[in-house]
Structures are given as structure tokens and as C-alpha cells.
Image (tube, rainbow, N blue to C red):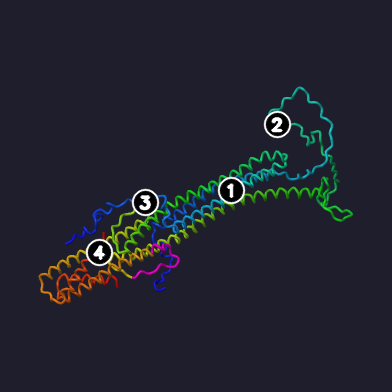
């Protein structure tokens, strides 16, 4: 009789043993481009829009102030002197625009990077779950390793892991029960009084069941 | 669609996965509030400065003066020189005041002589002093009625028009400042509310499929492999859901494989006369369970 725990492989007792610990890599931060880029685009565009509109308002106010001072000076001093005085204000206004543009670009870049990291924490668990789904699609119920620290959707993954473990354990129990039944039937066939005509076909079916169970055990590793 | 049971989105269940949805939405809302708040304060500081500069500029404008209306003065002879020895002021009396140029004690004296008869006047007499530029706003010339820009009336109107104009501009500037403030507050509130709704709706399109998958996961955990229905229109994670459907189909295929094998084994066992064997009974129970799970 085979040992069902042996069938589940070395990882059964310790799910993390013998498995590669996946680390985050820069190259695979965009796991689900559609999902991640959509959110990133919305947030960065919105932030850019707010910063742009309010930045323009700031510039407009300052420019108004400069113009007001310029008008006042027109009554008091000559045009050249006005230029020498308000030239600084205009330079300041221009510097303000450059500063705001730089701040806007910086904001968008930093925000995008942060959002890639943040959405990766959602896309990562989804990607990992998809890999397990693909294995299940092939009929393989291997051991599910937990998510990395800091990943989101922990609740969802816990539920998936719970389901996977239960389905896998049920399959292991079924294989175990079928193996026991197979052994018992083989034994009783040797001892019992089976009718000769069907003897061979029953024997063949038991062989096929054994092969089926061998395949199942491989799928449960 | 055959695989679509037609569940509609409703406001009641927009927050399916509170932790995930609120985290993303709050991040978006928080960031926007921070940006709006920070830049809004900056705008208000600059707007206050601009308003102050503009108000100062407006108040500094010179309005045309109203010519003073007064009687012409006549020069008075110089008063006698003040004696060197000052007289002691009487106790309790006020200090002597300097001679006012416009008082009768000064050198200038209004050149106006009004002599009233002793007879009683039926109406009060109004004395109108001569005004510079004339009192009439309009003058008659060859061309007809013309505006006299040097007339006293015109100058008064011009002065007060200018003063009122400045006051109105100052008020307008103050209003403009307040309008910026209220616009910022209004836009901020709208943005926060709009983003919160949008964020929840957007994340709902991700949380919805996850919720649906969770329901199927619970069923699979209980050994029920029901039919998997399609996602709603507009839902995200379509590819992920396809992976799940394939996984579900894979597990169902495993069960069906077991069912097929068990059926054949049981048929062969029954044919061989081992139908009542305890192991066969056990296998039959397993078969029944598996068949029920994929119904």
C-alpha cells in the first residue's frame, strides 16, 4: 500500500521547503499592463491636470501682480527704469513657471513609479494565482506557497489557498481510498470465488485503475 | 448570452472588497486633496499678495481735485510787532493762539461784505460764493450745448466718479480674491467627491470579478463544481477570470476522469460478482459523491 503523504511530495509537510523564493524584480513590475497602466494613467493624468490648472492660476496671479506694479511705475519713472525694475519680476515669473513644470514632471514620475509598485502588489497575487489556475487547468494540484510580505489581496489568496488545499486533500484522500479498495479487491480476487469469464476483464479494469491512480499521484505532487 | 446570468451593478454592493477598494480610492482622493490643498494655499498666498498690490495701486491713484469754494481774500496790513516782553498769562486762562491766516485776526480776511437790510426777509438768503470755472456744466456756443470740462460741477462729478471707481475696483479685487477661494474650495469638494465615486466604481470592476471567483472558490471547497458564468460587461480581470474558468474546467475534468474510471471498475466488479464487496460499496459511495459534485 502506498503512502498518500509520500505522494504529495516533500513540500507537503513544509510548503515552502525546496521551492524558489521569488523576489521582486524591476523587469516584472508590470505584470498586468492593462490593469496597472490604466490606474496609473488615471491618477497621473488627474494629478497633472490639478497641478497644471492650479499652477497656471498661481502664475496668472503673479503675472497680474507684476503688471499692476508695472502700470504704477509708468507714472513715476521712465520705461528703461521700469524694465530694470520689473525685469526681475518677469524673470521671477519665468523661474516660477520652470519650477512648476519641473515639480509637475517630478510629481508625475514619482507618482508613476509609486503606483507601479503599488499596483504590482495587486497584480502580483493575481499573476501568482493565475499560474496556479493554469496548473489546475492541466489537472495538477501542487502545493500553494503563500504570498510575499506586503502583497495585497491577501484575503482573496487565502480563500484560494484554502480551496486549493481542500480540493487537493480530498483528491489525496480519494486516491488513498481507491488504492485501499484496489488492494482489497486484488486480495479478495485471489482468495474469492470469482467467475472465470469476467475474471480477465475485472483484472484489466483493476490494472487500469492502478494506472489511473499512479497518474493522479503524479498530478498531486 | 447563455453564460451570463445578467447581474446588474447596484449602488448597494459597490464596496465588495472594502480593504482593497478603499485603499486605492483613498490613495487617489488623499493625493488629490493634498495637491489641491497645497497648491490652493499657494494660490491664496499669491492671490492675497496680488490683491494687496492691486488695491494699493488703486488707492494710490490720484483723482482730480475738487476746487475749493471760498470767498476771495483781501490782504490785511501786517500786525504790529510783538513786544519782547511777554505778558504773563492770567491764571486759568487759555494759552494765546497763533493768529490764523483765515481768521479775522490774521493778515487775510474774506473779501466779502454782506449788508442786510433791517427789514425782515420773507425767505432765507443763500449766499453762493463764486466758483472757479463757472457753475454751469454746459455752455452755449455756436456749435450748441457743450460740456464745460472746467466747470465746477463737472470737476466735482469727475472727482467723485474717480473716487467711486477706485472704491468699486477695490471691492472688485476683494471679491475676486474671495471668488478664487470659493472656486478652490468648491473645486476641491467636487474633486474629492467625484474621485471617491470614480475610485469606488473603478475598483469595483476589479473587486467584482474577484468576489465572483471567491464565491466559486467557496463552492469548490465544499465539493460543488457548478457551472461557471461569464463576467458582466465592463468588468476588469477578464483574462484572470478566463484562467479561473480553465482551472475550474481542469478540476471538473479530474473528477469526471475519476467518475469514468470508477464506473468501469464498478461495472467489472459487479460483473465479476464482487458487487457487495465492502471496497466496492465504498467506491460506489465515492462515485455517487463525485457525480453529485459535477451536476
- Marks 1, 3 in one chain: yes
> Which of the two discs, 1 and 3, labels the residue nearer the N terminus?
1
Residue A178 picture location, percent across and down: 20, 67
What is the chain identity of the residue bearing mark 3?
A: A
What is the chain identity of the residue bearing mark 4?
A: A
Assess disc 1: are there few (<14), some (14-19) or many (≥20) residues with their C-alpha within 10 Å of its C-alpha.
Answer: many
Residue B118 picture location, percent across and down: 85, 46
* Residue located 77% across and 32% down the image: B99
* Residue located 66% across and 45% down the image: A68
Residue bearing the label numbered 2? B94
- Of circles 4 and 3, the one toward us is 4
Is A98 on the left-hand or right-hand side of B10?
A: right
* Residue located 46% across and 50% down the image: A113
As drawn, the label of residue A150 is: 3
Which quadrant of the structure image shows residue A75? top right
Which quadrant of the structure image shows residue B186? bottom right
Is A41 on the left-hand or right-hand side of A177?
A: right
Quarter the N terminus of chain A occupies: bottom left
Instruction: Please give the range of residues in magenta.
Output: B227-241
Which quadrant of the structure image shows residue B53? top right
Amino acid at each position: 500500500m502506498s503512502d498518500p503523504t509520500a505522494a504529495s511530495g516533500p513540500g507537503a509537510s513544509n510548503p515552502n521547503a525546496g521551492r524558489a523564493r521569488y523576489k521582486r524584480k524591476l523587469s516584472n513590475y508590470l505584470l498586468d499592463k492593462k490593469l496597472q497602466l490604466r490606474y496609473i494613467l488615471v491618477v497621473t493624468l488627474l494629478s497633472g491636470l490639478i497641478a497644471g490648472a492650479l499652477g497656471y492660476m498661481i502664475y496668472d496671479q503673479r503675472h497680474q501682480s507684476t503688471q499692476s506694479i508695472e502700470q504704477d511705475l509708468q507714472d513715476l519713472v521712465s520705461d528703461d527704469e521700469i524694465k530694470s525694475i520689473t525685469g526681475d519680476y518677469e524673470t521671477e515669473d519665468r523661474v516660477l513657471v520652470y519650477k512648476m513644470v519641473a515639480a509637475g514632471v517630478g510629481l508625475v514620475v514619482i507618482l508613476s513609479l509609486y503606483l507601479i509598485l503599488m499596483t504590482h502588489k495587486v497584480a502580483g497575487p493575481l499573476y501568482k494565482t493565475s499560474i496556479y489556475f493554469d496548473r489546475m487547468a492541466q489537472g495538477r494540484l501542487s502545493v500553494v506557497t503563500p504570498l510575499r510580505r506586503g502583497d495585497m489581496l491577501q484575503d482573496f489568496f487565502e480563500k484560494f489557498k484554502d480551496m486549493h488545499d481542500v480540493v487537493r486533500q480530498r483528491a489525496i484522500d480519494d486516491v488513498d481510498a481507491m488504492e485501499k479498495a484496489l488492494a482489497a479487491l486484488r486480495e479478495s480476487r485471489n482468495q474469492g470465488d470469482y467467475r472465470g469469464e469476467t475474471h480477465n476483464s475485472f483484472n484489466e479494469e483493476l490494472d487500469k485503475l492502478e494506472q489511473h491512480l499512479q497518474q493522479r499521484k503524479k498530478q498531486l505532487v | 448570452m447563455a453564460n451570463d446570468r445578467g447581474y446588474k451593478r447596484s449602488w448597494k454592493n459597490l464596496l465588495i472588497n472594502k480593504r482593497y477598494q478603499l485603499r486605492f480610492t483613498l490613495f487617489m482622493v488623499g493625493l488629490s486633496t493634498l495637491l489641491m490643498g497645497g497648491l490652493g494655499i499657494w494660490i491664496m498666498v499669491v492671490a492675497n499678495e496680488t490683491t494687496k498690490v492691486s488695491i494699493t495701486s488703486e488707492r494710490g491713484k490720484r483723482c482730480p481735485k475738487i476746487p475749493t469754494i471760498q470767498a476771495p481774500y483781501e490782504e490785511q496790513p501786517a500786525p504790529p510787532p510783538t513786544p519782547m516782553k511777554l505778558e504773563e498769562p492770567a491764571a486759568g486762562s487759555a494759552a494765546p493762539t497763533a493768529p490764523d491766516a483765515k481768521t479775522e485776526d490774521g493778515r487775510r480776511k474774506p473779501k466779502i461784505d454782506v449788508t442786510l437790510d433791517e427789514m425782515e426777509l420773507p425767505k432765507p438768503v443763500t449766499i453762493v460764493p463764486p466758483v472757479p470755472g463757472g457753475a454751469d456744466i454746459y455752455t452755449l456756443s455756436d456749435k450748441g450745448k457743450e460740456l464745460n470740462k472746467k466747470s465746477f460741477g463737472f470737476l466735482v462729478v469727475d472727482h467723485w466718479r474717480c473716487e467711486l471707481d477706485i472704491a468699486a475696483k477695490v471691492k472688485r479685487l476683494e471679491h475676486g480674491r474671495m471668488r478664487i477661494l470659493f472656486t478652490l474650495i468648491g473645486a476641491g469638494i467636487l474633486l474629492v467627491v467625484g474621485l471617491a465615486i470614480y475610485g469606488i466604481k473603478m475598483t469595483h470592476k476589479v473587486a467584482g470579478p474577484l468576489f465572483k471567483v471567491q464565491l466559486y472558490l467557496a463552492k469548490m471547497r465544499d465539493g460543488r463544481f457548478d457551472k461557471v458564468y461569464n463576467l458582466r460587461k465592463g468588468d476588469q480581470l477578464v483574462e484572470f477570470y478566463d484562467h479561473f474558468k480553465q482551472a475550474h474546467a481542469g478540476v471538473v475534468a479530474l473528477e469526471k476522469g475519476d467518475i469514468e474510471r470508477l464506473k468501469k471498475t464498478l461495472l467489472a466488479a459487479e460483473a465479476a460478482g464482487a458487487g457487495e464487496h465492502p471496497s466496492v460499496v465504498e467506491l460506489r459511495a465515492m462515485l455517487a459523491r463525485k457525480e453529485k459534485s459535477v451536476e
